[in-house]
Structure formats: C-alpha cells, structure tokens
Amino acid sequence: MNFKKSILAVAAAFMLTATSFAQFGGEIEFTKKVGSIEVHYKYYVSGDNVRVEEITDGKIEGVQLMDLDEGTMLAVSPERKMYMEVPNKRPASDLDVEVDKTGKTKTINGKKCEQIIVTCSDKDRKIEYWVAKGDYDFFIPMLKTLNRKENQSMFFMEIPGMDGYFPMLSTETTLSDGTQVSELTAGKMTEKKLSKDMFEVPAGFSKFEK
C-alpha cells in the first residue's frame, strides 16, 4: 500500500512539473502600425526556438532565428540568400516608468485580457497594454534576445510579474497631447508542432562577414 502511494506521489509530482514547464508552440500573427506604415509579423515558436518573419505587402522581408536558451540570434535575408550573427549587447535599463495594473479586463481574440498602463514622463510616452495570461513563457526571453530599443518592447519589460503573459493589444501615445505613435495587435494564434527546418538557415545561404 505504501509502495502504491509512493508511485502515485511521484506521478503527481511529475505531472505538476510537466504542467509548470508548459510552453506555447505554434504560430502567432502580429501587426504593427506606426503612422500610416503597417507591417505584419509571424512568430513561430517551438521550445527555445523562435522564428520571426517580417512581412510587407505579402513578401517576407527579413527573418530572425533565435535560440532563447543561448540568447543568440541570426538575421536571415531571403532575398539576398545571406545570414549574419547578431550580437546582443544589451545595456542596463535606466527607464523611469510608472506601472498601473488597473484591474480592468476585456476579451480579445477569445482571451481574457488585463489592462496595464505604463507611463514615462522623460520620454513623453504612455503605453496601454492588454495582456493575456497563458503559456507564453517565450515572450520576455524573445524580447531580450531581439534587443529592440523601441518603447513597446522596453516598457513591457519594466512590468513586474509578466512571465507567461502575451500582449494581445498595445497602443503607444504621447503624454502631452495623446497622439497615437504605434499600435501592436495580435491576430490568429495557432498551436501546432513545427518542423525543425523552420529554425535553421536554409541550405545554400551564405554567411555575411563584416
């Protein structure tokens, strides 16, 4: 009887551990608007591997291949059939922001989202995020690896307790007059198993050397 209880306890612990390491795997469509410019992105996620495609007028303009465990990234140009290693030299953040978790909620793309407003007086910016809680543990490591110096990314990483969250909608405006600067919108999210080939440089591509 004690042996059976021990087996059940081990099985329960294994299931709890497996659940805690659950991770989204599949495709996420994303749209970014800056003024009159609209760019579409596709995120492909499989474990610690992430592929980001930047799409303009239906054409893939650029691809980033990331290993989140190593914190490394390759930039790939489908048009030139070349790739290059992108160094990640992220300086320490010195943003002075205020974070307001308002408690407001609404449903976006069938997911319950919470409103979080981040303001930075020094930059004259306010970003309103609507975030969904799930198994999106790849997102913050992805932002760190991409190392983009844009407000949408940097402000999000200043919000405490965002592990597992994903922004379904975020709008950046000026504090001074409320002018919209940028907007990011998550579209279709499809969970599926992806081929390893998607996260590798295609055969025949040359490495770009500076």
Image (cartoon, rainbow, N blue to C red):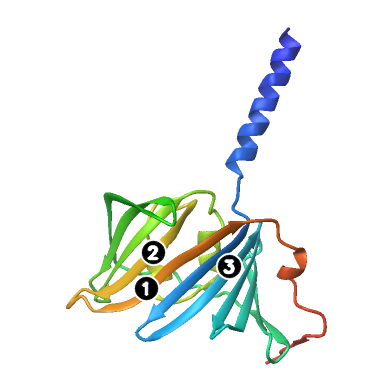
**Separation (CA) of disc 2 from disc 3:** 15 Å
Identified at 75% across, 63% down, the residue is: 195
Quarter-wise, where is residue 196 in the image?
Answer: bottom right
Where residue 143 appears, x then y in whole percent?
51, 67
Residues 94 and 169: in front is 169
Question: In terms of depth relative to the viewer, which is nearer, 27 or 15?
Answer: 27
Amino acid identity at mark 1: Glu
Q: Quickly name the residue at label 3.
A: 43
Which residue sits furthest right?
A: 204
SS for tag 3?
strand
* Label placed on residue 183: 1
Asked if 110 appears above or below 129 in the picture, the reply is above
Q: Residue furthest left?
A: 177
Q: Which label's residue is closer to the chain start, 3 or 1? A: 3
Sequence-wise, which precedes: disc 2 or disc 3?
3
Q: Is residue 117 left or right of residue 160?
A: left
Question: Residue 192: horizontal and vertical position, in percent?
Answer: 66, 56
Report the residue marked by disc 2.
Answer: 169
Quarter of the view holding residue 146? bottom right
Verify CB contact (< 8 Å) between mark 2 and mark 3.
Answer: no
